[in-house]
Image: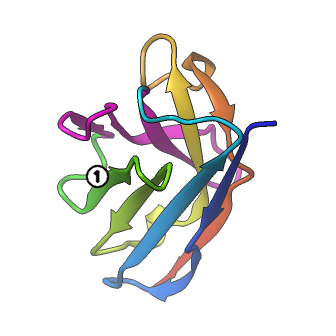
Amino acid sequence: QVQLVESGGGLVQAGGSLRLSCAASGRTFSGYFTGWFRQAPGKEREFVAAINWSGGGTAYGDFVKGRFTISRDNTKNTWYLQMNSLKPEDTGVYYCAGEVGGTITFTTSWRYWGQGTQVTVSS
């Protein structure tokens, strides 16, 4: 059974930082794209970032503007999202995703999902 488990969410003040982790089990994702999405209350889930199998290629949502960095450690079957300069509008549930089969910004393109971790940024 494939499981993706996020960790690292929490409450942080505006301007602060958090590092999210996504630990995968049940299969390896070393040969696949992995990524992060988020969902704010009352809004649709939106693309945050994705990284290719080697870590040499990354993509980000327009709102990131250099504040977030996605990375991965294939030896640990884990990927990360370092979030700096956080803003209140970054508040939401952050989901990790694994193995994409289409456009990376579409939720329907991703095969595996974690349960999400809450990120709350206070002003």
- Left or right placement of residue 76 versus residue 60 in this view: right
Amino acid at pointer 1: Val
Within the image, what quadrant is residue 27 found in? top right
Residue 81, position in %: x, y? Answer: 39, 59
Residue in the image at 35% along x and 85% along y = 16
Residue 57, position in %: x, y? Answer: 20, 33
Q: Is residue 55 magenta?
A: yes
Q: How crowded is mark 1: few (under 14 residues within 10 Å), some or many (20 or more)?
A: some
Within the image, what quadrant is residue 6 found in? bottom right
Magenta stretch, residue numbers: 32-61
Residue tagged 1:
64
Of 71 and 93, which appears nearest the observer?
71
* Picture layout, residue 122 above or below residue 111: below
Residue in the image at 27% along x and 57% along y = 69
Residue in the image at 61% along x and 48% along y = 24
Q: Quadrant of the N terminus?
A: top right
Q: Which residue occupies the extreme front position in the image?
A: 75
Residue 42, position in %: x, y? Answer: 70, 48
Q: Is residue 104 magenta?
A: no
Q: Quadrant of the C terminus?
A: bottom left
Badge 1 element: loop
Q: Which residue occupies the extreme top position in the image?
A: 102
Within the image, what quadrant is residue 68 found in? bottom left
Of 46 and 114, which appears nearest the observer?
114
Residue in the image at 25% along x and 41% along y = 55
* Picture layout, residue 24 above or below residue 117: above
Residue 18, position in %: x, y? Answer: 42, 76
